[in-house]
Image (tube, rainbow, N blue to C red):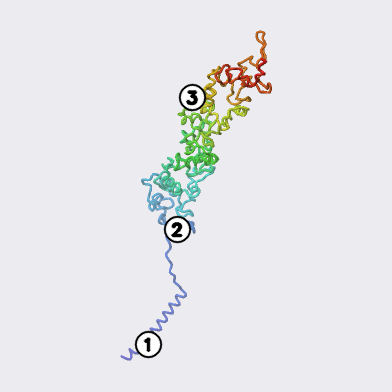
Amino acid sequence: MSRHRTTFGAKGVIYMVVGTIIVVLALITYNHYFPHHFVEPPSPMADCLKCHGVMAPQEGNFVHAPLANCLTCHTEHAMGEKSALVKPVDELCLSCHPDQSKNKVAVHAPYEGLNCLSCHDAHQSPFPGILAREERELCLGCHGQVEIASDPVVHQPFTESCISCHEPHVSDYQMLLIAETSEMCYLCHSDTEAELAKNLAHQPFVDGNCLDCHEAHSSPVAAAALLVKEERSLCLDCHSDAVNLANSVLHKPLSGDCSQCHEAHASDAIALLSEHPPALCFTCHHATRRELLSMTEQHPPFARGECMDCHEAHDSPHVGLLVQNERQLCLDCHSGSAEFAGTYMHQPVSEGCVSCHKPHAAWSSSLLAQESPELCYICHSGVKHEFAMKSSHPVGSGKMECTSCHSGVHTGDNRALLLATGNSLCRRCHSGETTRLQATVHGGINCAYCHAPHGSPHLDLLKRSEDANCTVCHRNKSGTYTADGITYHNHPTGGIHAGQAVYCSSCHDFHGPAVTNLLPYDGKDQLCINCHSLDSLRGY
């Protein structure tokens, strides 16, 4: 029994080993000739693509997520919906994309009508957002009226992307804007927003009404900031009361753009000016600045830079854009002076002060265009000639001026604006002569009867030669004449006699003293022996 177990055990082991080897070899041989590979189960869209291969995702496209599993949206067999959809399109889209239109101010019409496929492709697209067409082209397909090809200026965002400013589906703001108009504009124009900190801001700018002045997409106004119309016309729509184009004098900038002087949004200067006067005025009137600010005499309003005290900014019926008639403008400040209270007025004063005065600055006192007497000679050129004669009042020599005899040249109580009338005027300088004259037979005669006021070719400002001057009144007092049959021989005068110059004044003192016939001596003999010896007189 024991032998039997031993014999079986040895053979059995041999058989088992050999059998195992055979099995292993058989498996190796089988696997070598009949390999078995693991195969993944087919994708959800694999069967669909057998027929709808055109729907396969294309490299570079934006793919709708459900495209990975067609059965998300489609059934294998038709259920009554177009394209074998599991439910109507509007319901199907909302199952993944909840409606956002509740309580919104603006809803895009296609979105409101759940017509998603009017803008989006259901499966894939080369455009972001799986759009059916390029974004701007898609928008203009419905909103083509906003693109005006003839407009020379186009808003940059409009050339690139509509969604820079508009929401595609819903918005809390009108016109599907991404924010309130001003806030949206400030996203790009932050420098403009900073202007709100200035002292004075344009009301539309304060209110955020950018579109009152600017177009959103394009503008018909060349070289402008997307203005809705030409700049001046745009400004006058609101500010017509500040301008009267019917006036005869218009400020040159008014024919162009208002922005030459005014800021469009905000400014630290009054009236939205780009600078405070007079700096603003000097940007054009720079020659005025160089010339006038160096002058010694300056009109106080000009010195203070208050240009608008005298000038209108836009238009005026008066020359120089004056706020009113030149003379009246001057009198508004200077009417209180006694110089304007006289009965008689200097003609230039009645016409305009700038005939004599410079309105801004001058080198001469009282803002005179020239110093006297040269200023007076501009109108009174004949008088200048008189002062150059042989005998004249010393005007222009520094000893006296025109105003020595004439009033303050604006108005006066006497004709010719004289400071006094008759001999009273002459007495101001010639008190000795006029006092002596009053005591003589010549006392009632006006000095101007014999003397010229300015200049004369004769001595002592006489209007005529001395003898001719006297014989105007004293006829038959010179030469030889006959009266009542008697021949009279007057003392020879008017030339050289007996070696001496003999004139009326050789014997008579026209102004005095108070002696008979204006003779310097009481006795005629004493007078005669001044020229004639006693021996020569014995023959008479």
Q: Quadrant of the C terminus?
A: top right
Vertical comparison of 531 with 120: above or below: above
Classify mark 2: helix, strand or loop: helix
For badge 3, the amino acid type reads Gly
Can residue 108 be seen by looking at this rendering? Answer: no
Gap in angstroms between the C-alphas marked 2 and 1? 63 Å
Mark 1 neighbour class, 10 Å CA radius: few under 14, some 14 to 19, many 20 or more: few
Frontmost residue, 225 versus 388? 388
For badge 2, the amino acid type reads Cys
Specify the label residue 11 is tagged with.
1
**Can you give x and y, in whole percent of width and height, for residue 517 in the image?**
58, 16
For badge 1, the amino acid type reads Lys
Frontmost residue, 137 versus 272? 272
Mark 3 neighbour class, 10 Å CA radius: few under 14, some 14 to 19, many 20 or more: some
Vertical comparison of 273 with 346: above or below: below
Classify mark 1: helix, strand or loop: helix
Q: Which residue is mark 2?
A: 48
Q: Quadrant of the N terminus?
A: bottom left
Outermost left residue: 1
Classify mark 3: helix, strand or loop: loop
Q: Which residue is mark 3?
A: 342
Comparing labels 3 and 2, the label whose residue is closer to the camera: 3
For marks 3 and 2 on the same chain, the one whose residue lies earlier in the sequence: 2
- Judged left or right of residue 501, residue 342 is left
